[in-house]
Amino acid sequence: MSFDVAVTLRRGERMVEAAFATGPGATVLVGRSGAGKTSVLLAIAGLVRPSRGHVRVGGRTLFDAATDVPAQHRRAGVVFQEPRLFPHLRVAANLRYGRGAADRWQATVAMLDIGHLLDRWPRTLSGGEARRVAIGRALLSDPDFLLLDEPLSSLDRDRREEVMRAIERVRDDLQLPILMVTHDPEEAARIGTSVVRIE
């Protein structure tokens, strides 16, 4: 499955333009803070409407002049920069919120190494643990593709490595198309099958 994106977005007083087409695997958008990477990711997710252009994932048109598929029907698993776990639900209940793929529960928990966290409250998790749970919740919604917005930001070196390995397992074991945003060229080189620089 590939990403084919050509969008113009108005963000406040400025315009963001991006155009790229990538093949299967992990696509990484890299660039300095404020370049518009997250805006492009949100446009793919359906959470921001472009002024013009198109968004196609795996040949399926999600947005163009005649089409605007609502976010809830785009089949995107989205992990925001902050994990946004429900504070009143334990980890297991946060994961079950995804609902769509009960048959994948054990495999997802094992792949992300979060089995020992299932009875914990979100407030007791480290940053790396919370990110892995957020990725698990997104995967259990049975998405067609995964969108990751700066999933390694604000983590120390050990936690970054922990989450990086989890993303690599998703990329390699599930063959799930990923689009990840980062400002770190080293992260982009390690994760990306395709790397797109946004200036």
Image (cartoon, rainbow, N blue to C red):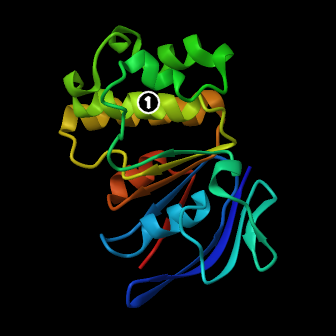
What residue would you read off at disc 1?
Answer: 166
Q: Position of residue 186 (x, y in %)?
A: 34, 53
Give the class, few, some or many, for how many residues have Cα within 10 Å of label 1's Cα (few <14, many ≥20). many
Kindly identify the residue that appears in the image at 61 percent across and 83 percent down. 51
Q: Secondary structure at mark 1?
A: helix
Q: Which residue appears farthest toward the left when viewing the image?
A: 156
Judged left or right of residue 141, residue 197 is left
The residue shown at (42%, 54%) is 188
Can you give x and y, in whole percent of width and height, for residue 84 in the image?
36, 41
Is 152 or 77 nearer to us in this picture? 77
Q: Quadrant of residue 104?
A: top right
51 vs 94: above or below: below
Q: Quadrant of the C terminus?
A: bottom left
Q: Relative to 189, does residue 66 appear above or below in the rendering?
A: below
Place of residue 99 in the rendered image (x, y in percent of width and height, measured from the top left): 61, 25
> Which residue is located at x 66 percent, y 70 percent?
5
Q: What amino acid does circle 1 point to?
A: Ala
